[in-house]
Image (cartoon, rainbow, N blue to C red):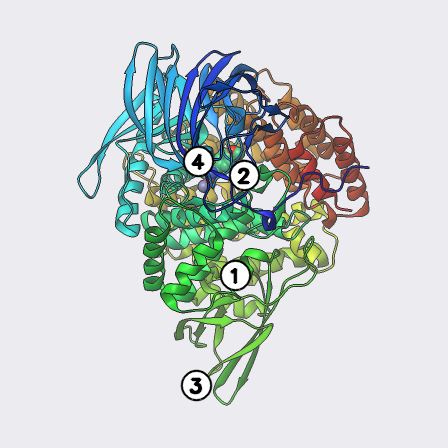
Amino acid sequence: MRDAAPNTIHLKDYTPFGYLVDEVRLTFDLAPDATRVTSRIAFRPNPETTDRRFFLHGEELRLLRAAIDGAEIAPEITDEGLTCSVPDAPFVWEAEVEIAPAANTALEGLYLSNGMYCTQCEAEGFRKITYYPDRPDVMSTFTVRINGTHPVLLSNGNPVDSGEGFAEWHDPWPKPAYLFALVAGDLVAHSDTFTTVSGREVDLNLWVRPGDEGKCAFGMEALKKSMRWDEEVYGREYDLDVFNIVAVDDFNMGAMENKGLNIFNSAAVLASPETSTDDNFERIEAIIAHEYFHNWTGNRITCRDWFQLCLKEGLTVFRDAQFTSDLRSAPVKRIRDVIDLRARQFPEDQGPLSHPVRPESFQEINNFYTATVYEKGAEVIGMLKRLVGDAAYAEALDLYFARHDGQACTIEDWLKVFEDVTGRDLSQFKRWYSQAGTPRLTVEEAWQDGTFTLTLSQETPATPGQPDKLPQVIPVAVGLLNPNGDEVRATEVLELTQARQSFSFDGLAARPVASVLRDFSAPVVLDHDLSPEQRAFLLAHDTDPFNRWEAGRALAGQCLLDMITEDAAPDTAYLDGLTAVLRDDGLDPAYRALMLGLPSQSELAATLHQRGLIPDPQAIWEATETLRQTTAQHMQDLLPRLRAESQIEAPFRPDADQAGKRALGSAALALLSRLDSGTQAAADYACADNMTLQLSALSCLLKAGKGEVELAAFYDQWRGDRLVIDKWFGLQVALAAPEQAAETARRLSAHAEFNWRNPNRFRAVFGALAMHHAGFHHASGAAYQLLADWLIRLDPVNPQTTARMCSAYQTWRRYDDDRQLLIGAQLDRILAQPNLSRDTTEMLTRIRGS
Ligand code: 0A1
Ligand code: ZN
């Protein structure tokens, strides 16, 4: 029997460290198999506590020498760190350790990627570099000397000295060790400058491998826009002389906000029209903004402990979403974010991995960089802003920066600034941070004598470790429409604080149609029993762009569920309503493209499960295909017009306008390809001059069962470009028929270019397989088994990426007994592996449940 919870860490056990760090000096003598790290750290007793235990984290280090105030000592060493006795007064700790970057395949700590030295320290990677109190509440200035032969040697802060074979950096801003970074490589820079609002000139560099210079311009523009935006909207100015970004091919996540030295997965920063899609461009712009915004929300004000992760992540996601809304289209951004929330956060919150936005315990913190912490964390801030209003939000943020600059903070600190500014008691609101699960919001309507009453009730299902839930504060944005389509009541935010509460609107001449949860004002599942006619009415008339889209989405969802459960024919009310919206060329093309989307197959499975039915992935797939085909036929006459509208004469620009047109054009081509067997797509492919069009045409061809020649040509054209080849891998799995998906992934995993140690390549194939709902859940169980085989192989090499991929199995309890048996067997098989990592063990134990 496995121990139920070995080494579980609890929020309630937090205690401050017994020592403060005033200064850190590090020297790196770089060598692939034996890098020498020399540290000199000034400690002093922490007056906030009397606990004088001295423990330094350290893992996989070879200690060569340790000294206190110059006198050598022999500390007591374990797998996790060391202890020794220290003076009850300020002292200087010195250590020399040896590490092996070339053997580091986990991509945590100091590692090598294509011959370039690179670090990843969040959350607990610094302890693999040297002995240190590796916890975010210990903050210090850092001075770093790098001795190495690489032409480019970078660390945090400002450059102080450099010469043949060395460079020295100093970061004057106290920071936790998780923000430490070092890069050494043969890199080239795309450089620019930025003049801050107070007139300081900052050098900006985007460092890439030779050959990638042509993919830097967009990222640099995004960085400058982010710097300006944070000054204008949040009054936040950059605080060093240089800002460096480095692109690296081997990286577990998207990017990392190390102080003054952001490190990016190359997929999250390199872009060119020929090699990147519009979606890539938008994502890159958002990630650059996100990492840059961390400079204030995360770096200058950091987290006291890892339970507070949402303090920096929720806020920074919220800020990057505001940025994208300002630069692009706010409704389109909101809709995309909600699609993403439902696709990634809802399944997490509704299954065995459900945890609060601020978790109360963990075994491996790397497993908590989740959609709940990030995306639900951002939704919570959006609700707070909606409740207090824009002016109070701005005031509270100013107070937050003024009060907590240079500190390591908690959610309590964060809420307190809002309480102080508004005088509101936020204790009930705080439940959003501690209660897991997606609340269900039910709406009942009543109409009498000119008064319209909405009765709202909330219920949050039990989640692991939390059987009983209390009512939360739910801001419900509501507007009312007259039967003629005019808005009779503009958007108003109702504050639901009880389990059940009524809100009345009087003085109405006719019974209105209610548009509830406008702009998706809270991350809940809405249960509002509207008729198809009412939904069609909202689809035609709602003045709230989010809810107008949502009405179409709900109609499509209902139509699909009827097709699945009752073998119904596709609903013409949906098809007519959709066609009318698509015809309206006064509407943004990007918005119309979103209207053409359907609820994902996984989302349909979740809805069926919530209604007490067992989802059949194959039936869901077939209904979706049928509805797509019917939509194509229904809109046949309109498709050429939509394509004409999407033509762009101007040179390629990755902005919202052009991207919107291309999105509509691609959506129209996808429908058209169902009618012409891919003839138009083949023609489009032949003349595509950017990746968005090339990939969309190739997808349509593959979907139509064609495109073998183009697929091979695509490979030949792009064989030198690892990011495009990732797309080539992923596309084939994503577009395979359900019964072919596992076999396609297996075949690709035998391809010479399938470098499974590279997280991007691994995810291209197996991430796509996990996302292919009907393919992953094919009754044969082949995909379950194939993924398990590969997770077993990857775990000893890269536990973090393995553990993240385990979430593919998280929804397993939704499905029938046969599938549960098949998945359960794979979970057990992986869990039975000797020496399974802590990361993967924790994930699978939680998914498996009791
Ligand atoms: N803080 C980064 C994300 C990140 C987290 C963990 C990592 O390694 C375990 C790497 C990056 C962000 O929010 O962008
Ligand atoms: Zn972040």
- Foreground pick, 110 / 733: 110
Q: Does the residue labelled 3 lie within 8 Å of ligand 2?
A: no
Looking at the image, do the residues carrying marks 1 and 2 touch, with CB atoms under 8 Å apart?
no
Q: Which circle's residue, 2 or 3, is located before the other in the chain?
A: 2
Report the Cα–Cα distance between label 1 and label 3.
40 Å
Q: What residue type is labelled 4?
A: Arg
Helix, strand or loop at label 4? It is strand
Residue furthest to the bottom in view is 449
Q: Name the residue under label 1.
A: 430
Q: Mark 2 points at which residue?
A: 52
Q: Which circle's residue, 2 or 4, is located before the other in the chain?
A: 4
Q: Mark 4 points at which residue?
A: 44
In this view, the mark in front (1 or 3):
1
- Foreground pick, 429 / 344: 429
Looking at the image, do the residues carrying marks 2 and 3 touch, with CB atoms under 8 Å apart?
no
Label 2 environment density (alpha carbons within 10 Å; few <14, some 14–19, many ≥20):
some
Label 1 environment density (alpha carbons within 10 Å; few <14, some 14–19, many ≥20):
some
Q: Which amino acid does label 2 sit on?
A: Arg
Q: Name the residue under label 3.
A: 509
